[in-house]
Image (tube, rainbow, N blue to C red):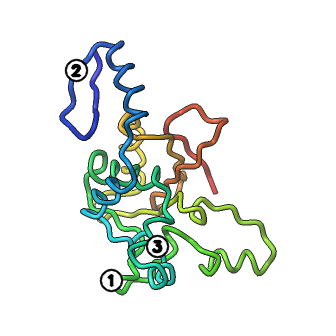
Amino acid sequence: MRTYFGGGRRPIQVCAFCFYILEVTKTFLKMDKLKIVTELKKYFKVQELVDRLTYQRWGESAWNFLDGRLLEVILVLRRDVLKVPLVCNDWLYGGKNEQRGLRTNLSPLVKQKTDKNVLYLSQHNMGCAVDLVSAKMTAEEMRKLIVKNANKLPCKLRVEADVNWLHIDVMDDITKKDKVYFFKA
């Protein structure tokens, strides 16, 4: 018997074959982006995931620049795995962070690289990465819980190691087999 966590319902015990069928079916029944955003709004405003300029230009439509896989991972981590408040960008609340989510060509980190003619292929630029912190849990504690609960994640997850924040992205490295894998920047 194996424990199956599906669709946010209570875990159920199923045989190994049924578990396999449920997992395969789940990949075809993933939440659509609108439903994900609707759920995610219970925990995050779009301003917390994009920079000030993006929000000023696009408003609530800025959700469209964020990868649906990333949004679903953030939702699952916040609601089902970590279960603690998470902070990405805090500029909306007077904080100094606005480059921890989506980064654009005008974001200082990106602009500096471009001005120096340095190739910069961050997953942040593609709407596929966020850097998160929590007042309730260290980054290392979060990383350990994510690995322990990898079966709850909707897709592969790349996690930055040895930093005091939680960097996650949904870059699908074809050389990696693990659901959660680590890298050093």
Drawn side of residue 104 relative to residue 62, left or right: right
Question: What type is the residue that disc 1 sits on?
Answer: Tyr
Q: CA distance from mark 1 to mark 3?
A: 13 Å
> Which quadrant holds residue 39?
bottom left
Locate residue 88 relative to residue 111 in the image: left or right: left
In the rendered image, the vertical position of residue 18 relative to residue 34, given as above or below: above
User: Comparing marks 1 and 3, which lies closer to the viewer?
Assistant: 3
Residue 153 percent across, percent down from the top left: 40, 40
Mark 1 neighbour class, 10 Å CA radius: few under 14, some 14 to 19, many 20 or more:
few
Q: Secondary structure at mark 2?
A: strand
Task: Kindly state the secondary structure of the residue where label 1 is placed.
Answer: helix
Quick one: which residue is furthest to the left in this view?
A: 10
Q: Earlier in the sequence, mark 3 or mark 2?
A: 2
Q: Which mark is residue 93?
A: 1
What is the total number of numbered labels drawn onto the structure image? 3
**For residue 31, above or below residue 103:** above
The residue drawn where x is 18% and y is 34% is: 10
Label 2–label 1 contact, CB within 8 A:
no
Which three-letter amino acid code belongs to the residue tagged 2? Gln
Local packing at callout 2 (Cα closer than 10 Å; few below 14, some 14-19, many 20+) is few
The residue positioned 66% from the left and 74% from the top of the image is: 110
| Foreground residue among 136 and 151 | 151
Q: Secondary structure at mark 3?
A: loop
| Above/below status of 27 relative to 168 | above
Measured as percent of width and height from the top left, residue 154 is found at 41, 40
Which corner quadrant holds the C terminus?
bottom right
Q: Which residue is mark 2?
A: 13
Tell me the distance, in whole angstroms, between the alpha carbons under discs 3 and 2: 39 Å
**Which is nearer the N-term, disc 1 or disc 3?**
3
Tag 3 residue: 50
